[in-house]
Structures are given as structure tokens and as C-alpha cells.
Amino acid sequence: MFSMQYLLIAAAVAGCAALAPVRHEEPDMLSDWRKLETPVTPDHSITLRLSVKQQNLEELYKTALAVSDPKSPSYGQYLTAAAVKSLTAPAKTDITTVTNWLTQHSVNFSVDGSIIEAKLTAAVAAKLLNTQFHHLSNDATGQHTVRAEDYWLPSEVDNAIAAVYGMHGLPLPPRVALSPLVGQDAVPDVNPKVLEGTYNVSGVKISGSTKNRQAVAEFQGQTMKPEDLSKFFSMYVPSAPTSEGKIYNFVGDKGTGIAGVEASLDVDYIMGVAPGLLTEFWYYQSMDFCGDMQKWTSQIINATNPPLVHSVSYGWQGELKSLGCKDAAVQDVDANLAKLATMGITIIFASGDSGSGYSDYSSTNKNKLYNKLYPSWPASSQWVTAVGATRFVNQQVGEPEMASDMFGSGGGFSTMFDAFKDQVAAVKHYLEIAEDLPPAGYFPPGGRATPDVSALGEGFQVLANGRTTVVGGTSASAPTFGGLVSLLNEARIQAGKPAMGYLNPFLYQNADAFRDVILGTNAIGRGTGPLKYGFKCAKGWDPATGLGTPNFKALQVAAMKAVAGGDAVLVV
């Protein structure tokens, strides 16, 4: 029999263990990054963003599916932002736990829903979190940032928090414009007129109403020049007044400056295929990709009457931890994307330009065999529509389309998320008929599969800093498809119907509105040529081109019929 003294000692030990601080390890870095010896000055600014655990997330996910499924009686009956925030609001005790901790350490902070943000000096942050900061430099890209070593949170604070941003995040590597590989035929010039003809785009008269707006999101130095956009319209969208080549609104950090090719491509084509539709430019200049994803999605949720369609041409095909993006943060961002689906907001992501994402080695340790295929994230989130890339057969406008081979159209199967209901049958069919699949163990056949759809992605004419540049990538395909979705929204809103919202259930239920792409493979790297393993195109959905490329008239017919089990209510 245990003595009372023993039990008291055991309880005290257990209590101490429960209250022990929780360590958050500094992740391994991409191999080109290195720590510098130059110390971080005590007054260096650090922004700490703490995402407090939210409630009722399973109910949120069910609601997001219900309002987005044309077969559901709730289709189109989107929740307001206020209702979504009320549903998922953190427990007051969790908010209090975190704010009391910050107050006890004399740290100023702000609370916005589930996000608690504190701006501190490196010296204060180091003391608060029992860590040290250091400068990082990337010799290959020239990028620089500041990062913490391992840090510690009090156990009660750690239990109240879903994810932490601002400590370990790294930026995406900057990308250079893609060019044809040696031996490939010259690509034809692709512009809005070519896209209009290829995808049978007509029949929607744009009102210019503020109720139907679209946006692109840009990061890490990708600003734009307004005069470039105006010139692009005069050269390539002659049917529209040059005055329509103008950004309606800028959100976030200052979005104008030297024109980035990526940013220019995005605005040229989301606007070029839907001239007259009001377009916003959301820009974030920080060097923390995962943190930026959280901040960007949160800002959409908190916006008054946000744009209905957002196109994003950024993502990572590799180990997310190498960017300092931990699983908790991925799940936290995913919850925000589900909120946007519940609110009727369409999120489009480029599916990536590194094909199957095949790698023999860990990106953080080139001596470690890894053998894995990587789809791009956030394109691999269930709550976004991932867009792959095609080109014309024989590089001739008007020919059928095939998977891009100037680069590999990103696609595959997520290890983080399961396939959603409406894509299960399509994926099962592919796995039954596909030829030369990668070996078992290289991909999870039940994972969320990407891309969902595709569009042309080679030969795009882009105006950047006054000069025409020929650009390729799924970053061309995504804004193109985004602009077409905005046209569908225009037709529906004018008819008194709700916006398209989260698209994927509708898309897979209307696969016949797409032109199947059966030629090509995504066993191709980004500027590296063939990969050892990848996925071939096949009849029906495939992991290179998804359901295929859009037939806009067929999509419009399907969209106008999509009302489902009751009279949907338009929320504006």
C-alpha cells in the first residue's frame, strides 16, 4: 500500500511535468540556406502571430460541403463572415490564457478573432520565448531573413494555441520565367483573344458592379506597374476600353513598384479574359510563406464584402517543414480556407510547375534517400481548386491540347489530406486504367488528388516594365481559369443566383463541361527535363490535367442550372 507522503510526492511530480514548458524545435532548412555569424540586434522587429485553437471545426467542414454541393438542399446558402466567426470562435478561457501570459511579460498585443498579434523587439521576444534569433542567407537566391532557434511556450499557453507564426518561417525561392527545353518547338503566342476562342468564351455582359469582384494574391517582391496593365489592354484586349486595364483596389502592403513578371502575368490574364470586371491586387512582402498564407486568408475573412474569386500562383512542391511550415500551421491555414468555402468565396491555386514533384532525396539533406512525390501546397487543400497546365498539340493554335512539356504540370496525391467525396470515383477510375504508375509507396492513392482542372500554360504574352515577355507555367493557367469563374459569377448574380463559391463539388459533378486531355505526362521537372516517375494523362480525370480544359459555354449552362434542393439565398 502506498503511503500518503508518496502519493503527495507523486502528485507534485506529475503536476510539475504537466506544467513543463513545451519545446518547439527549429526545423531543418532548405540546403541552400545558412546561418550568418552577424548577431541580430536587440531592437530588430519581430512580429509574433498566435492562432488560438478554434471550436466547432468539424461542423465548419460539414457546412462548407453542404453549401457548396449542388446536390445539397443548402447549396448556395452561404454563411456570413460574422456567422462563421461565431461558429468557430475560440474558447474565452484560451484567449484569456494567452493574453494573460503576454500581459504578465509587459508585451503589447492585439486580438482579432482567433489571432493574437504582438510586435516585439528581438530582445523581448528572446526572453519571452527562451530563444535566440539569427540571420539566415540563401546563397543561391540572395534572400535574407531572421529566424529563431528552438523556442519554448508555457504548457498552458501551448495547449491554447493551434499554430505559431513569425518564428521559423522561410520564403519560397524566387522563380525565373520558364523557357522551352532544348529541342522543343517554338510556342505560339497566347493572349486573351486566343483564350477566348479556345475556350468558347462568350455570352456574358459584364456590369462592372462592385458585387462581383475578383483578386490576385502576390508575395515576396511581386509588385506591378499600373502603366504596364494599361498598355497590355491596349495591345491585347482591343475590344475593351483602355480604362478597364486598371486595378480597382490595392490591399495589404504597397503593391506598385518594379513589375514582377509573376504579378504582371496574374493581373494581365485574370483581367484579360474578363475585361470590365473589377479586380483587386492583394500583396504581402514578408519572407514567411506559410505565415503569409495565414495572414492572407484571415484578411479575406475579415474584409467587408471581399472579392468572390481569388487566384494564387504560389505554392511549394516539397517538404513543407523545410520552409518552416509545420503540420499545425498547414491545418490552421486549411481551416481558414474552409471558412472561405463556407462564405461562398472561390479560391484558385496554380498546381505547380515541377510535375510529379519527384525527388530521390530530402530537400534538407541531399545524402538522405527519400523517394517521394510531392503535389503542391496549398493547391492540395480540399477547399481550393487546383489548376494544371496544357499546350496545343504541335504548338499550333486551334489544335487539341496536351499536358505541358515545357515544364511538368504539377499534380499528384496529398499525404496531408484525403480525397474528397466528389473526386473519389474519378481518381479510382484513373488508378484502374493508368499506365506506368509510380511504385507503391511513392504516393498515397487515397490522398486529395490534384489538379482539378487545367488550362493553357505556355506562350503567354505578358507586359512587365514596358516590355513583352513570353511566360509559361501553371501560374498562367490559374488566373485564366479564375477569370472564367468570375464570368460565371457575373451570369449567376445577374440572374439573382448566388456566386459559385467553393467549386470542386460542382466541377466533378459536371465533368462533361470540360474537354478531356489524354496526351502527355507530368514526369517532367521545372526546367530539368524528364523525371523518373510521374503520372500520364488518361481518359477522364488524371493527375497532370485534372478533368481537362474548360468549355465555357457548357460550364455556363451547368452553372445556371446549379440551384439544387431549394431556393438558394444570395448573400452580398
Image (cartoon, rainbow, N blue to C red):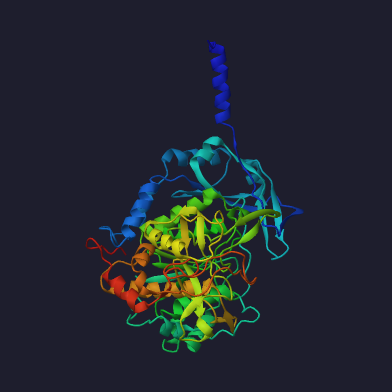
Q: Residue at x 61, y 75 (%)?
A: 177
- Reply above or below: 27 against 227: above
Q: Nearer the viewer, residue 319 or 501?
A: 319
Question: Which quarter of the figure has residue 556?
Answer: bottom left
Query: Does residue 96 appear to the left or right of 284 in the view shown?
Result: left
Q: How many marks?
A: 0
- Reply above or below: 197 against 150: below
Query: Does residue 250 appear to the left or right of 29 in the view shown?
Result: left
Question: Which quarter of the figure has residue 424?
Answer: bottom left
Question: Which quarter of the figure has residue 512?
Answer: bottom left
Question: Measured from the top left, where is residue 421 in percent x and y?
Answer: 37, 56
Q: Residue at x 36, y 62 (%)?
A: 505
Tell which residue pokes out farthest to the right in this image.
37
- Can residue 544 be seen at all in this image of the molecule? yes
Q: Residue at x 50, y 81 (%)?
A: 392
Question: Measured from the top left, where is residue 272 in percent x and y?
Answer: 45, 80
Q: Nearer the viewer, residue 560 or 39?
A: 560
Q: Nearer the viewer, residue 228 or 377?
A: 377
- Reply above or below: 361 against 235: above
Question: Measured from the top left, where is residue 183 in percent x and y?
Answer: 64, 82
Query: Does residue 567 appear to the left or right of 554 in the view shown?
Result: left
